[in-house]
Amino acid sequence: MFPLTFFSARFAVLFFLFVSFWPWEKDPGEVKKSSFKIPEDPALLSRVRVALFYEKPEVQIGVPGPYELKGFPGEETLAQGAFLSPTSIRADRSGIRVGPRLYPLSGLRITSQKKELQIEKKKYGDAIQVLKNPLGSLTVVNEIDMEEYLKGVLPSEMKALWPEEALKAQAVISRTYAVFKNIENQDFPFTLGSGTGSQVYGGKGVEMRLASRAVDRTRGEILTSRSKIFPTFFHSTCGGRTTRAEYQWKIEPHPSLRGVECSFCRVSPYYQWKAEYTGSEIRTLLAKKKFSVSQIQSITPAELDVSGHPRFFEVRHSQGSSKIPANEFRLAVGANRMRSTRVTIQRSGDRFLFLGRGWGHGVGLCQYGAKRLAELGYNYKQILHYYYPESDLQNLEDSFGTGVWSQKPPAEEGTFVGRWFRKAQSYLEDL
Ligand SMILES: [Zn+2]
C-alpha cells in the first residue's frame, strides 16, 4: 500500500493525463496530418497498444500460465503466480479491485510468460494494461507485437478464403495503418481501437491460417510515399471510383489518397444499394449528433468530386438550410444503412429514398476491387500501386534490421483453453 500523499499525487498526474489526452478529445477542428517521417523508435514500428474496451465498469481477465501483476505506469510487482484463473477486475472509487483485493492505483499491467491471456472469454497475446478512467470506468489495452496483432486483424477485415494476393495487400495496408496510428497517437495511453473506427481486432482466437500466412509473407512491409508513411485507408466497395481523403475527413490532401477508377468491384453485393428514411427520422438522427434542422424539405449532395462522392449534404428545412460534412451526415444516420456517401436522394412526401453505390468511406483500397484484381492475376504489389498511386513498398526489416521485430513465440496450438482452464475454473487465485 502506498502512503496516501504519494498515491494522491500519482493519481492526480494520471487523472490530468487521461482527461487531457484521450484521442477522441482532440480538437475536432484540427486538420490531421497525412504523412509522417518513419520514426527511429523501434517500439513504434514493432509493437501496438490497442484499446479493447474504453469504458467498462468491470472486466474478466485470466492467465493460463505464469503471470505478473504490476502497477502501471511503473514497475512495482504487486502479485505473481503460476496462473490466474478468470478474475473480475473492477474500477473502485479509491483504485482498482482485482478479485477481492483493492489496489489504490489508477493503472495495472498484467504480463504473461506464455504470452497468452484471456479477456472476457477471448484470447489475446503478450500483455494487458487496465487503466482507470477519470469517470470511474476501465480502459483495457492490449500491448502486442505488430505481426501478432495483424494476425488478429486480417480475418476480421477480409475473408480469409479470398485470393492470397488480396490478403497480402490487406496485410501491408493494415500494418502501414497501424504504424501510422502509432506515430500519430504515440503520446496517448493507446494508439488504436479494436472496432470499425480503427481496424477490427479480435485477438488470437480469430486467427486463420491463410490470413496469418499473408501476414508472414509480407512481414515488415509498409507503404510509403516520398519515403514518408501515410494512412492507408481502405473500405469494402467503392462503387466505381475511389474518392479523396479530404472529402471524408479533416485531413491534409495526399497524392496517394486522391482517388482512382475502379470498375473491378462490380461483383460486390454492395455495388448498388438503397435505403429509405422518413424526414422526421433523419431529423432525429441528425439531432443526436448535434446537427439541428427543422422539417426537412430536401437533401442534396454538394461539391461532388469526380467519383461522385460529395463533400457536404445540403439539408434545406423549414428554418433555412444546413451544410453538413458528408461523412458526418452518413455516420449520423447510420453507416450500415446509408452504406456510402455516393448517393442520389429522391423525396416522395415525407420519405427520402437513398440510391447508393459502394460500402464504406471510399478512400484508398477498394477490397472487392482488390479481390477481383487478384483473381485476374495481379500481385499484391501491383494492386497496392494501383489503389495508392505514387506509393512505394518498403520493408522495415531492410531499413531497421530484423532486431526491430521480437522473436515469434513458439506455436502451442490447442493448449490455451483445454488443459488449464478446465482445472482452474473454480479456483480463485489469491490476489
Ligand atoms: Zn471499387
Image (cartoon, rainbow, N blue to C red):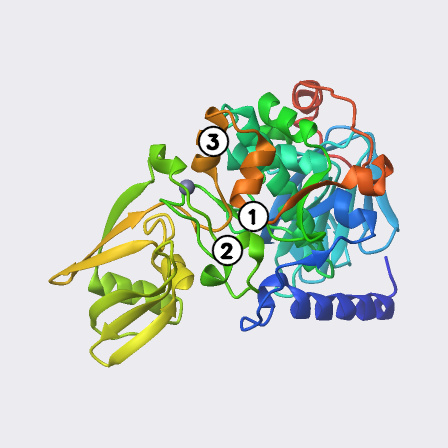
As drawn, the label of residue 373 is 3
Image quarter where the N terminus lies is bottom right
Q: Secondary structure at mark 1?
A: loop
Do residues under tags 3 and 1 come within 8 Å of each other at their CB atoms?
no
Q: Secondary structure at mark 3?
A: helix
**Mark 3 CB lies closer than 8 A to ligand 1:** no
Ligand 1 falls in which quarter?
top left
At a point 72% along the width and 71% down the height, the residue shown is 16
- Residue behind mark 2: 258
Label 2 neighbourhood size at 10 Å, few (<14), some (14-19), many (20+)? some
Label 3 neighbourhood size at 10 Å, few (<14), some (14-19), many (20+)? many
As drawn, the label of residue 389 is 1
* Residue 86 visible in the current orientation: no
Q: Specify the amino acid type for callout 3.
A: Leu
Label 1 neighbourhood size at 10 Å, few (<14), some (14-19), many (20+)? some
Inter-mark Cα distance, 2 to 1 = 8 Å
Do residues under tags 2 and 1 come within 8 Å of each other at their CB atoms?
yes
Q: Horizontal and vertical percent for residue 101? A: 75, 48
Image quarter where the C terminus lies is top right
Camera-side residue of 220 and 290: 220
Identify the mark nearer the N-term, 3 or 1: 3
Inter-mark Cα distance, 3 to 1 = 16 Å
At a point 78% along the width and 58% down the height, the residue shown is 104
Identify the mark nearer the N-term, 2 or 1: 2
Q: Specify the amino acid type for callout 1.
A: Pro
For residue 175, side relative to residue 167 (left or right): right
For residue 84, side relative to residue 28 (left or right): right
Camera-side residue of 60 and 331: 331
Identify the mark nearer the N-term, 2 or 3: 2
Camera-side residue of 102 and 71: 71
